[in-house]
Amino acid sequence: MHVKQAAIKHYEDGKILHKKGKLSNAERAYKKAIKISQNFAEPHTMLGNVYFEGGRLKEAYNEYRKALKLAPNHPTLLNNMGNLFQSQGENEKALSWIDKAISQDPDNAVAHNNLGNAFWSLGKETEAIAAYKRAIDLNPDLADAHRNLGSILLDLNDLDEAINCFNQALRINPRDQKSCRELGRAQNERGNLDEAVSAYQQAIAIDPVNAEYYTELGVVFSDYGEIEKAASAHRKTLEINPGYARAYLSLSMNKKFTQDDDDIRAMESLLMTKGIPDEDSIKLGFALGKAFEDLGNYDGSMEFVIKAAGLKRNSIDYSVSESKEQIASIKEVFSPEFISNHRDSGDSDRTPIFILGMPRSGTSLVEQILASHPDVHGAGELNDLVKVYESIKEPVDKQQSDPFPEGLLGLDSKAFADLGKQYIARIRKHSTNAKFITDKMPHNFLRIGFIRTILPNARVIHCTRDPMDNCLSIFKNYFNKGHRYSYDMSELGQYYRMYLELMDYWNDTLPGFIYHQSYEDLVGSQQAQVSKLLQHCGLDWDDACVDFHKTRRKVKTASNAQVRRPIYSDSVQLWKRYEKHLEPLRAAIYD
């Protein structure tokens, strides 16, 4: 056997082993090929791929460099280098390498797909979408490109198109568990419980020991009020991975703890584990805080919460001064003069009902009441106002919009009307025929001036709650995406005061535009308060609005369990049970 033929034989053996997932055996075969023929580029490339798949990135880089010395313009190698840099978050370098690959092979669908990944990581959504579509044009059977396009469309809330993409990916590769998972996410966002469950179950059938799939399935059930099914899914997660802190946190939101609860002991034991990651300690701390509150042990509850919140605060970059600057800028832009000059601006559409206020102020409850009316679609917490603002790029060569709200200065009435129309188009994707659509993003209280300028006929419902109860509820809850001010009592109290000052400003500047709904009034006089609320929104009375807990719809917030119950007063003045722990909060709000 000639030397070259022997090298090729080992190389081909390596590829077979590699395809079977036997990375160690494939590594040995590729190394034998290289030992026989140092100038054979392909085994260097494939050995680099083995290292890359095993997370040995430095070794992968070295092998790719060796291969590039032998084949400097090989598009696959150039593309692999791009992937390597992207995996390390160096997306600008990744773009450079992938561009080189495409220049050598313009019809390389895989390279265009990877180009889309790099663009997406850099926040360049338009360019990413174009790259994925080009990859699909070149190779309609490239499942990864369909899935990636679907994922970015899902992030952009283009749910129907995202679902089409995931279904197409699964038509090509029915065992693509990533597409199953993403389809589950999309169907959940779309409000299709059965389809979301089916997609996750398909992913689980492919990979039955993937704890993440059961956790996400549990979250879907929880969003729709299927509490027992949610708890069962989280239990399955913990069977697979008994140390999975996220599952315990989710489970804690879907059960009432009792004395001598095995879950409490398991969480406490896990929390004491040496070397446990901070993020796991944080999730377990908040879960145990909930558990001890259920037991009526408020001192124990707050001890866990304070420790967890402190750890979380250490991982967050936040300063009160940046919030002060933001709110000062909002007041400066939306001056009485600005409001007066643009009183007739915007689009006249009456579809939106904005439900806003501080988190945990009753926004979910108010939305559930309204969404129980046949003329209202509850769309949940939407990021659409932010996306509409970010569409402003003046001049045209600007890479990103100015910080909110400075980009509004200099716009004319037509521009404001166009922004209003853009918002309506976005929310109409949730319902094409509902008379009203709710947007329950709490922090839209920062954007009330923006709402008035682009949608003057929108209704704005401001949810209020006792300041101490409101802030306690924020402090003792873990937020997936986090509110950066919420993990330190003093900072939380200071932010709350800024919120109150801004709301006073909006009330003075936009008299009559905002309807204020007190949580305590709603709890104390449900029928009368619901009647006034419906009247304000231009809705006829409907009994379903006082039987809101029977409405089956997605509620994707920390309140999803509470809105499945009739109105209750358990949390009114709850702060007094924690009073001795809350002095920093009280001082920041009132002193």
Image: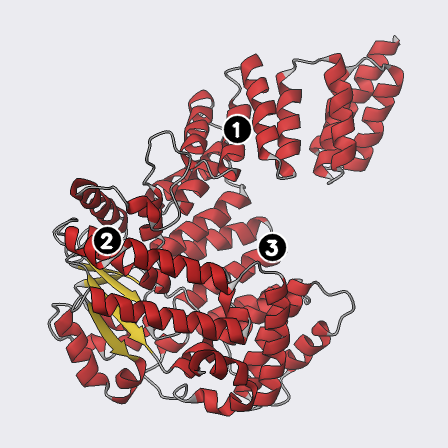
Marks 3 & 2, CB-CB < 8 Å contact: no
Q: Which residue is mark 2?
A: 431
Q: Nearer the viewer, residue 240 or 96?
A: 96
Q: Residue 425 placed where, x, y %?
A: 23, 46
Is residue 144 visible in the rendered image? The answer is: yes
Q: Quadrant of residue 152?
A: top left
Rounded to the nearest angstrom, the CA distance separating label 1 from label 2 is 34 Å
Q: Quadrant of residue 558?
A: bottom left
| Residue at 14% over, 58% down | 457
Q: Nearer the viewer, residue 137 or 63?
A: 63
Is residue 244 visible in the rendered image? The answer is: no
What kind of element bears circle 1? Answer: helix
Colouring scheme applied when the structure was drawn? secondary structure
Rounded to the nearest angstrom, the CA distance separating label 1 from label 3 is 32 Å
- Give me the disc on residue 115: 1
Sequence-first tag of 1 and 2: 1
- Give me the disc on residue 140: none
| Residue at 47% over, 25% down | 135
| Residue at 88% over, 10% down | 3
Amino acid at the residue labelled 1:
Leu
Amino acid at the residue labelled 2:
Ser
Q: Is residue 241 above or below residue 8?
A: below
Sequence-first tag of 3 and 2: 3
Q: Which residue is mark 3?
A: 208
| Residue at 42% over, 55% down | 196
Q: Is residue 563 above or below residue 40?
A: below
Q: Is residue 139 above or below residue 253?
A: above
Q: Residue 260 placed where, x, y %?
A: 64, 88
Q: Quadrant of residue 132?
A: top left
**Around disc 1, counting alpha carbons within 10 Å, would you say few (fewer than 14), some (14 to 19), or many (20 or more)?**
many
Q: Is residue 325 above or below residue 588?
A: above
Image quarter hosting the N terminus: top right
